[in-house]
Every structure is written in structure tokens, then in C-alpha cells.
Image (cartoon, rainbow, N blue to C red):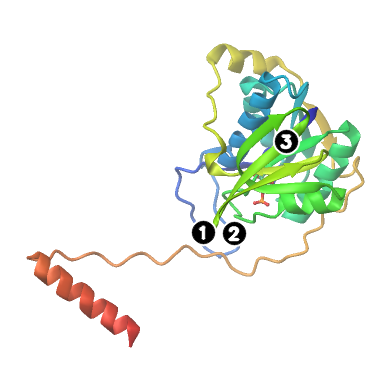
Amino acid sequence: MKILVPVKRVLDYAIKARAKADGSGADLAGLKMSLNPFDEIALEAALRLKEAGQAHEIITVSCGEAAVQDGLRTTLALGADRAIWVSTPENLQPLAVAKLLREVVLRESADLVLCGKQAIDDDANQTGQMLAALLDWCQATQAADIRHDAGSLDVVRETDQGTETLRLTLPAVITADLRLNEPRYATLPNIMKARKKPIEELSAETLAVDIAPRLTTLHVAEPPSRPAGIRVKSVEALLNGLAQTIGGKSQ
Ligand code: AMP
């Protein structure tokens, strides 16, 4: 089985996002960028499938400007066999990413795409689903566990009603949820080795994909700051205050 793992470079999860003064987008200048955490989980799942003898090759792919190659180097240090950079001039919307990934999947004859359930910058939660639709492949989203047995893949999904287990027929797309695994760290020797590994370069033009945005961002704003708390003298005063607040809201 050949696994393709799409990875996105996003603002590090520990950094607070700021909106640009003109409201046209997020201001990322000088801020730390990292691999999307759900994509690290997806890669870890792919590595475990390979270690269990279920996969023979893991290819990571990232679409975007030159800087996304940093994330690809990290994936090589973590154990990916190859990395592909699809160079694009601008920030991409999920449909454009899905169309680019479709072409890479077909070129590589991949059997399984393991991607994150969502990118923590746009919180779109769309790319995996759109990719499965464009490929006409089956999909299991928000995987909390992946079990392999005699050539089949069972995916456990957490739902509001409990868990749902799906048996997938390959080829398929799986999107990774938080509880799927705990990703490993790259070792220093592997980070050094990854620096020398080649990254294949493709572009939206070579893949003949129209990446024109379909949506226009009208305004980006930071959440309103929370009002300061107050200190109360007793538990009784706290309960009275809460009762008044709840009473006020329900009227
Ligand atoms: P989204 O639909 O934007 O929330 O992203 C869902 C998943 O699609 C991410 O976790 C990645 O696995 C993949 N993805 C999104 N954007 C990119 C990108 N520019 N390059 C590669 N993979 C991406």
C-alpha cells in the first residue's frame, strides 16, 4: 500500500493569531509556523501502518509557497520516504488544494490518503472530503483509531452517539482526529539527514489545475476581549451572582 499524506504549514498552535489592521486577513509576519497538528497525527498513523508491514511507501505533499518545504523536511525527518512540494503563488482554498492533491494521487497511484481532519488556521474541515469526492473514493473522516486486518482497514470514528466503526475498501481517504495517536518527535540525526534529502517540485501549472479562489474574504477580526473578572467575598455571593446572570439571560 502506498500512502500519501498531505501536510499544511500553519501558524503554530501555541501562537495567538492577530488580524491585520485593515481586516483583510491574519497577520503572520515574523510568527512561528509549524506543521498542522492533525497532519502530524495523520503522518504518525501512516508510519505505524508501514511499521506494521501494511504499507511500503509514504509520500508527503504540501501545496503553497517555498516556505512549505520546511514542513516537508520535518516529515522526512519523521520517516516519510519522499516529499513533494506543489508550488503555488498564493494562499489556497480547500477546493484548490483538493484538486491539486487529486492530480498528485493519480500520478503516484496512491492507495490511501491520510490527511488531517482540519487545518487549524482556516478550520475548514473540507479538503479530505472534497478530495474523496473528486477521486470518487470512499472516505472515513475524523478517525480515532485505525485497525488493519488481512488487507482491510477498519476506522473507528467518535460521534455524538458513541463510536462508529467503518470497514474501508481501498483506495480511500481517511482524515485524522486528535485521539488517533500521539505523534513521535524527530531525532536530531534524522533532522540532519533530512536536510540533504531531495524534495520533488511540481506546480499548479504542471498539474494543469485551476486554483483560482471561489470565495472572497470580506473581513477578518479578532474575537472581542473578555471583560475582566470580579472577586466575590463568599460562595453565597458567587451563587447569587451566577443566579442573577442566568436569570438575566433566560429572560
Ligand atoms: P482544511 O480542509 O483546510 O481544514 O484541511 C484539511 C487537511 O487537508 C489538512 O489537515 C491537510 O492534511 C490538508 N491540506 C490542507 N491544505 C493543504 C495544503 N496547502 N497542502 C497540503 N495539504 C493541505
Mark 2 and mark 3: Cα distance apart in space? 40 Å
The residue carrying mark 1 is 19
Q: Is residue 231 left or right of residue 43?
A: left
Query: Residue 146's x, y, as percent?
Result: 64, 36
Q: Are the residues flagged by discs 2 and 1 in contact, CB closer than 8 Å?
A: yes
Mark 3 residue crowding within 10 angstroms, few (<14) / some (14–19) / many (20+): some
Q: Residue furthest front?
A: 150
Q: Residue at x 11, y 65 (%)?
A: 235
Q: Secondary structure at mark 2?
A: loop
Picture quarter containing residue 204? top right
The residue carrying mark 2 is 25
The residue carrying mark 3 is 153
The quarter of the image holding the C terminus is: bottom left
Q: Nearer the viewer, mark 2 or mark 3?
A: 3
Q: Secondary structure at mark 3?
A: strand
Q: Residue at x 75, y 24 (%)?
A: 55
